Amino acid sequence: MLLGSGVLEVAIGLVFVYLLLSLLCSAAGEYIEAKFNNRAKYLRRGIELLLNETKGGGVDLASQLYEHGLVRPLYRTNTKLPSYIPSRTFALALWNMAANAGADGQGSPVGVINDLGRVREIVAKTVPNAELRTALLTLIDEADGDLNRARQNVEEWYEAMMDRVSGWYKRRVTVLMLGLGFVVAAATNADTISLARSLANDGALRRSVAAVAEQRLTISPGAQPVDAGATAEERDRAATARLRAAYGEVAALGLPIGWVRNDGGNDADPRRVPSSPADWLLKLCGLLLTGFAISQGSPFWFDLLNRFMVIRSTVKPTEKSKDQPSKERPAPQGRLPERDGDKDSGADSKG
């Protein structure tokens, strides 16, 4: 019974713990990212690479873009940069900046110049940063006189950079989640080895965790996103509430999670602080396993838990009914009864 209920429920229990700890880890990561506004910082870095000189010097056109009337309303607060700027907004703001640079401060501000030849002339003469000037002239000339195509080229140029920014940010989040995975595992003392032992040795606990896990499948693996128009205080409160809810789910399972002091009581308590180098090594291995596991993210463990539940529902009915002997051929007791064919063959052999 390789996939018997015991082994399968131990696996389900571990996967469910990983899922809940992943939710806790994700909530902590969202809180950190919202607090420090790192997504917006990466966006600003990408726009600086587009508009400013990468070798230093030149004019800080990125700051001018962020102060533009089309971009300024996207700020979350007076000081918090926006975490997203649409490509059309970027293109129109840049187009308008070039048009006003060509006006030389004479007369009223210019909106958008629809003469592509005039735009090219302004870009060639007034854009101070050589790298940006070269890029814009290339995008304009590729349009072959089509104004809409030239704007589309600028938008696609911006979106290509945003793809790179997304890659940078995803790599940062991956590293952050890995670090948080180890921190959460150590803070909660969620030792995979100890958890597996507890689930394997306690059938009531094992079945209880599996039942809770089955109910949890009806809930989405991720928390509801915070309203985009929420204030910074509202986002902090929502992130804090999410952290508490995630930890509450883990604590409610009744698993041996957490730390207790060595007060001369039960030395077999897996929550106690290790007292020997061998125990510390085993504890460290268990925490590292948990850290790597929960850093995979809650969607991964949610899908895996769902698959295990499908297997469990398939295996369970088979275990309830043991093999019954056939009514036509009763279970043998002692010597096998002779069949007619056997008697004939015996007679033939005597003859």
Image (cartoon, rainbow, N blue to C red):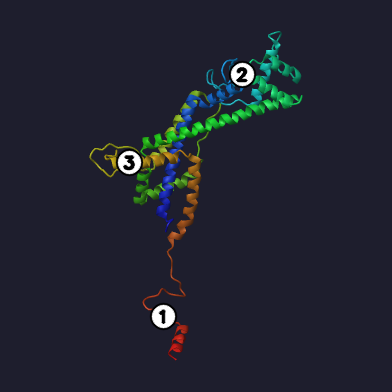
Residue furthest toward the left? 264
- Left or right side of 157 for 116: right
Residue 56 screen position, x and y as percent = 56, 17
User: What residue did someone put label 2 on?
Assistant: 65
- Within 10 Å of the Cα at label 2, are there few (<14), some (14-19), or many (20+) other Cα atoms? many
Could you say which disc has been placed on residue 281 in the image?
Answer: 3
At horizontal 43% and vertical 90% (from top left) the residue drawn is 350
Label 1 SS? loop
Could you say which disc has been placed on residue 337 in the image?
Answer: 1
Which amino acid, mark 1?
Pro
In space, the residues marked 2 and 3 are separated at their CA atoms by 55 Å
Residue 280 screen position, x and y as percent = 31, 40
- Left or right side of 182 for 263: left
Observer-side mark, 1 or 2, equals 2
Residue 63 screen position, x and y as percent = 58, 17
Q: Which quadrant would the C terminus be assigned to in this image?
A: bottom left
Q: Earlier in the sequence, mark 1 or mark 3?
A: 3
Q: Which quadrant of the structure image shows residue 141?
A: top right
Observer-side mark, 2 or 3, equals 3
Q: Which quadrant of the structure image shows residue 117?
A: top right
Residue 20 appearing in the image? no
- Left or right side of 264 for 285: right
Residue 118 appearing in the image? yes
